[in-house]
């Protein structure tokens, strides 16, 4: 059973328009892997499919994690396997506090079929302790836990919550899609610090970014480039630097030349 996330020949459409045309990508357990690429290349589509978003039709291929094709699992089951899908949870839930949301998420994780939830739930005192420690490590104000979920949250606060959730759930693989829209420098720094702190032997991360700048804060071991629905190049951190310096056109030309 492998802790690598293996995406094989993944094909997907929106309506009858093919978007992913055979994506091959392996995110090794415990490594930080960035996927970059020009706008419209299919990066968010890939992230959304890993997260189980219903708008996409997968027309071929598989995504393997822990010996299972996760395309056959619902979002809950994916989470229980240890995948963390950062952008998946509801935008705003009136009347639910941050603390309650996190406790519910943690308990859902601990729940086991046929077992009384009372037996598997985290004891309240233990939860409070973990929450307090998690918030302290992220330098968060204690009052944050009492606020209603996402109500009036800044971009930075939403990101902080995401990282806090990761800290508590201890996923083995985190998948994040960082769009550039509205991502202020503060939010960027929070995500980067969180990923840098949590990633390591126990957690790998697939960081999809539209924003080269993110990679000056997060140091990936592996970088892959997506273009027109395919991974067209794999490399190390030097590939990100090269793209930052030269843009994507040289790569496009190289690929056209090789075809
Ligand atoms: P990226 O995240 O790399 O910018 P996306 O995955 O968002 O790329 O988009 C890939 C392609 O899919 C683009 O051509 C885009 O226009 C198209 N696309 C994305 N979402 C939709 C949608 N809801 N309906 C139709 N086409 C879409
Ligand atoms: Mg996108």
Image: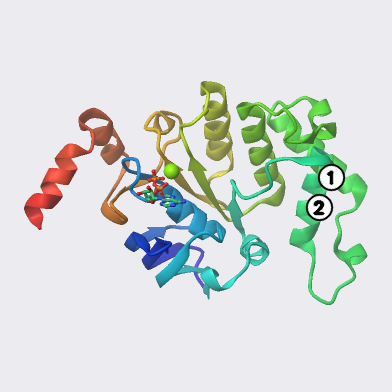
Residue 252 falls in which quadrant of the image? Answer: top left
Q: Which residue is mark 2?
A: 104
User: Which is nearer the eye, 25 or 179?
Assistant: 179
User: Residue 108, relative to residue 226: is it above or below?
Assistant: below
Residue 87 coordinates in the image, percent (x, y): 59, 46
Residue 150 coordinates in the image, percent (x, y): 72, 35
Residue occupying the point 86% across, 59% down: 121
Q: Is label 2 in a helix, a strand or a loop?
A: helix
Residue occupying the point 60% across, 70% down: 73
Residue occupying the point 23% across, 33% down: 247
Colour mode of the rendering: rainbow
User: Does the closest atom of ligand 2 sit within 8 Å of the Cβ of label 2?
Assistant: no
Label 1: how many residues lie within 10 Å, few (<14), some (14-19) or many (20+)? Answer: some
Residue 251 falls in which quadrant of the image? Answer: top left
Q: Is label 1 in a helix, a strand or a loop?
A: helix
User: Which is nearer the eye, 8 or 55?
Assistant: 55
Q: Which residue is mark 1?
A: 100
């Amino acid at each position: 059973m492998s802790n690598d996330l293996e995406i094989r020949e993944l094909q997907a459409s929106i309506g009858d328009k093919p978007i992913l045309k055979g994506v091959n990508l392996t995110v090794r357990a415990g490594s930080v892997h960035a996927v970059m690429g020009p706008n419209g290349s299919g990066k968010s589509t890939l992230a959304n499919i890993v997260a189980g978003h219903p708008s996409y039709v997968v027309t071929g291929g598989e995504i393997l994690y822990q010996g299972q094709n996760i395309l056959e699992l619902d979002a809950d089951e994916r989470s229980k396997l240890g995948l963390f899908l950062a952008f998946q949870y509801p935008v705003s839930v009136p009347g639910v506090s941050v603390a309650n949301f996190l406790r519910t998420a943690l308990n859902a994780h601990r729940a086991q079929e046929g077992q009384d939830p009372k037996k598997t739930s985290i004891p309240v005192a233990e939860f409070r302790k973990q929450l307090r420690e998690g918030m302290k490590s992220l330098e968060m104000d204690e009052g944050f836990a009492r606020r209603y979920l996402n109500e009036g949250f800044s971009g930075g606060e939403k990101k902080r919550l995401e990282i806090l959730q990761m800290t508590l759930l201890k996923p083995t693989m985190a998948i994040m899609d960082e769009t550039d829209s509205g991502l202020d420098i503060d939010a960027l720094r929070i995500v980067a610090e969180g990923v840098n702190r949590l990633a390591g032997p126990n957690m790998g991360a697939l960081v999809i970014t539209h924003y080269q700048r993110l990679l000056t804060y997060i140091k990936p071991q592996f970088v892959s480039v997506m273009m027109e629905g395919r991974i067209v190049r794999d490399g190390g951190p030097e590939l990100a630097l090269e793209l930052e310096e030269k843009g994507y056109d040289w790569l496009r030309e190289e690929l056209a030349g090789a075809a």
